[in-house]
Image (cartoon, rainbow, N blue to C red):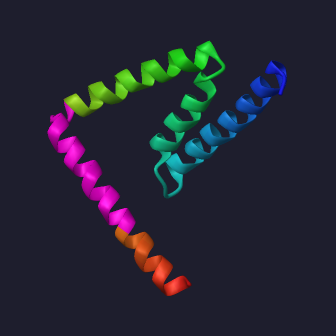
Amino acid sequence: MTPVIKRILVGLIGGLVTLVGVVALVAPGPGWLIIFTGLGILATEFAWAARVLTSAKGVASRAANAAKIKKKHRLMIIAALTFLLLVLLVIWYEYTF
């Protein structure tokens, strides 16, 4: 795959994922997580996306600190949500298939 084609594909996929994240901000879904994922994809090929991602991570970190959520508690929340998601996926799988 030529570098130009790779750059175009990364741009299209990353842009699409970021756009889905923007839609998920107003629709039900993890909008910010999807936006960060899209920016991460774009950052693999574009310097401007890496700068935006670094800036967004800083803003998210400052917001979490302003909410007074300690890092230990954030990790516990993420672990609990991940566990809940896995339980829901198992239940969904059992009733669907």
State whether residue 81 is above or below residue 73. below
How many marks are shown on the rendered structure?
A: 0
Give the residue displayed 46% in from the left and 41% down from the top. 32
Residue 31 visible somewhere in the drawing: yes
Locate residue 30, reporting x and y percent: 46, 50
Position of residue 95 in the picture relative to residue 13 (left or right): left
Position of residue 40 in the picture relative to residue 15 (left or right): left
Residue extent of the magenta highlight: 66-86
Image-quadrant location for residue 87: bottom left
Position of residue 96 in the picture relative to residue 5 (left or right): left
Residue, far front: 1
Locate residue 19, reporting x and y percent: 64, 40
- Let me know if residue 82 is in the magenta part: yes
Locate residue 24, reporting x and y percent: 54, 50
> In which quadrant of the rendered image does the C terminus lie?
bottom right
Locate residue 64, reporting x and y percent: 25, 33
- Let me know if residue 69 is in the magenta part: yes
> In which quadrant of the rendered image does the N terminus lie?
top right
Give the residue displayed 61% in from the left and 38% down from the top. 18
Give the residue displayed 15% in from the left and 34% down from the top. 68
Would you say the magenta stretch is mainly helix, strand or loop?
A: helix
Residue 69 visible somewhere in the drawing: no
State whether residue 65 is above or below residue 50. below
State whether residue 30 is above or below residue 32. below
